[in-house]
Image (cartoon, helix red, strand yellow):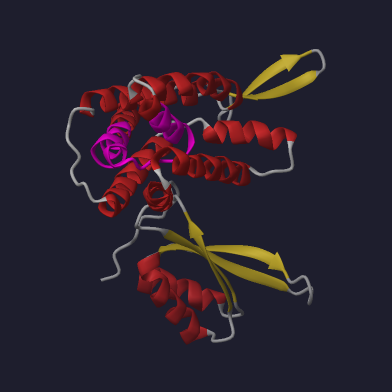
Amino acid sequence: MQGGILLTGSESGLALQPQHSKLTLAKLLRRGLFLTIGAVLVAVALEIFLVPNRIIDGGVVGISIMLAHLTPIPLGLFLFLLNLPFLFVGYKKIGKTFALSTLYGVLVMSVGTSLLHQVPALTPNSLLASVFGGVILGVGVGLVIRSGGSLDGTEIVAILVNEKTPFSVGETVMFINIFILGSAGFVFGWDNAMYSLIAYYIAFKMIDITMVGFDESKSVWIISDRYEEIGQAILHRLGRGVTYLSGTGGYSGDNKTVVFCVVTRLEEAKLKSIVDDWDPNAFLAVGNIHDVKGGRFKKKNIH
């Protein structure tokens, strides 16, 4: 085995098969902890803020809330039963680890909603419930997704639809949730449906923030004839490592050296100032990065 690739011989030649690495105990415990925290936060958002005020979320959760309102069956049971078919699909399409993480998260969420069902709502104000319920719900879902699981089968349905139709996963999720949130108007009234839309939007944004993090990193590409001076300035004034990449101009055909580095968003302004000091005409491109790990991203001391 070399570089994580398992070499296996066969009559037709060599086949390369990636070797599946098992989670260590520490990583398994960390994943379980964040899955638990995320699922509990979702249960709190539902039973302490949203459900008592007749505000729903999208997807399976929204359908479960409406069914629990129309029948004597508790919300937790609907959350578990309606997600079961998607666990099988998730196992087939995404993998065993995803399916097991999702099963655990759904179980914790279902049990949590059952235990919190008798707890009174923290506020009777629908707007406050929408805002704070959406924030807590989004953080909880974001933690579960970052831990490799899911609490809703909508995206799995969207993946299946995407394979057989021209609609993207995002478009399918949007269509499904528009239908579900629209249905809330007939069940809970149109005011509550609009509050549900507010909660859904806030939760959607909080999922992004939770997954990306507040300390969002930036990838930077710089093309300049003074690449060496700029690279040294970034190294010494920002304490960030740089990588020099070779390139060729598509229009001019000239050989170019590209300076690549990763900085935090708080360092972005200073980096632009450094580039401008050495070469005001330099090409500079900055992009968002969700996660950075490995390599030499750790900041060096500059003082």
Name the foreground residue: 303 vs 288. Answer: 288
Side of 75 where 81 appears, left or right? right
x, y percent for residue 182: 51, 44
Residue 3 visible to the viewer = no
> Residue 71, located in which quarter of the rendered image?
top left
Q: Position of residue 57 (x, y in %)?
A: 41, 41
Give the dominant element type of the magenta stretch: helix, strand or loop: helix
Q: Which residue: 43% across, 36% down?
A: 62
Viewer-side residue, 1 vs 208: 208
**Which region shows up in magenta?**
39-67
Pinpoint residue 216: horizontal percent, then vertical percent.
40, 58
Quarter of the image with the C terminus is bottom left
Asked whether 57 falls inside the magenta stretch, the response is yes
Give the camera-side residue of 127 and 26: 127
Q: Position of residue 159 (x, y in %)?
A: 62, 34
Residue located at (40% from left, 45% from top): 189
Query: Does 11 appear above or below 174?
Result: above
When asked about the image quadrant of residue 150, the answer is: top left
Task: Name which quarter of the figure residue 118 lies in.
Answer: top left
Q: Is residue 55 part of the magenta span, yes or no? A: yes
